Image: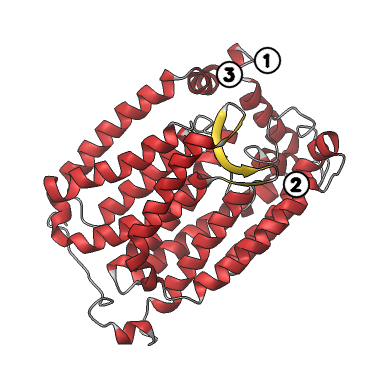
Amino acid sequence: MALTAALTVIGFVVVYSSSFVRALVDFGDPYHFLVRQMVWAAAGAIALVIMARTDYRRLRPLAVPIMALTIGLLIVVLAIGVKGGGAQRWIGVGELTIQPAEFAKIAVIIYLAAWLASKGDEVRSFEHGLLPFVMIIGSVSVLILLQPNLGTTLIILIITVTMFWVAGASVGQMLALGTTGFVTLAFLATAAGYRADRLTAFFSAEADPQGNGFQTLQALIALGNGGIHGLGLGASRAKFFYIPESHTDGVFAIVGEELGLIATIPIIALYMLLMFRGFQVARRARDEFGQLIATGITTWITIQALLNIGGITRTVPLTGVPLPFLSYGSNALASVLIAMGLLISISRFGTDRGGYADKHPVETRRVVRRRPDS
């Protein structure tokens, strides 16, 4: 709870500082993005409290309906979704829009956790484990790719493959998934022009500093300008349209420029601590359903933070994914807060504290399976 609150509050400061220039130019109101971030944070906080106070095991019978609803919404997006920035990812009118791909992460985690927990040792077989897994994840991934949204697809793939491994997949299955996934992602990354441009910007940004390499180089310049101590809160120069989408994908560069290394290191430390606590919750979970959900949620936030920060620091190619808690994004923030509520529920109800677990001893018993190769 403390980590969630700290990162969310830091996010308010970062969103306002990185967005007020664009908000003033586009909407005549420097608080435009901050107000919307706070409204969705309040809605997400309510959902977090509800999830935290609800035993997570009650979601298991709802896994299939939740997944069906998610797939339905993803299809609706492709049919009548709102277009913007060359993509079709939203449902709604005007300011009130929903991005189903953000909530699809939670739905996939819940559904896959219930499915894997019910499979037992059959997970290691091809016909009962690997093949159905590929079909399930492939259907969701294709719908999100068609929007197009490669960044979210990549995150979902990493989440699900990690959960598959934790559930007991064999080394051979993981090698097959890894090889197939690498070849597929390599093809997708070079098939579309804008994705190929991101790879070019990563490997040779200096060759085209005013074109493909502009965002990558400007992010590095911003971090360099900040140095150790930073220019001061609100004093960023890069947010004056040097870094595209400085309030979403580029917030970490703005933090580095304004507050320097003394702020970016503690922020990374908060994400690392959140990762540690999340996997600790997974390790201590008394049933496999809770263990897999906690693993999926923690992997999601960790990988997304890694991809965003890695893109800004030119450690990995830019993927366009927001930084959890800190980037502006109404749906993204709400979905992360809901996920944190679910993680807190596992921490609260996933131990011997009575309640639902006492009434359902068979369903909630702890299952610990050793790998044959361990």
For the point 57% across and 49% down, which residue is it?
332
Observer able to see residue 200: yes
Residue 232 picture quarter:
top right
- Decide: is 255 above or below 26: below
The disc, 1 or 3, on the residue closer to the chain's N-terminal end is 3
What type is the residue that disc 2 sits on?
A: Phe
In the orientation shown, which residue stands out farthest toward the right? 28
Q: CA distance from mark 1 to mark 3?
A: 9 Å
Residue 227 picture quarter:
top right
The disc, 2 or 1, on the residue closer to the chain's N-terminal end is 2
Residue 190 is left or right of residue 215, and the answer is: left
For the point 26% across and 83% down, which residue is it?
361
Pick the residue in front: 278 or 140.
140
- The residue wearing badge 2 is 33
- Decide: is 279 above or below 207: below
Query: Residue 10: x percent and y percent?
Result: 69, 56
- The residue wearing badge 1 is 210
Q: CA distance from mark 2 to mark 1?
A: 28 Å
- The residue wearing badge 3 is 205
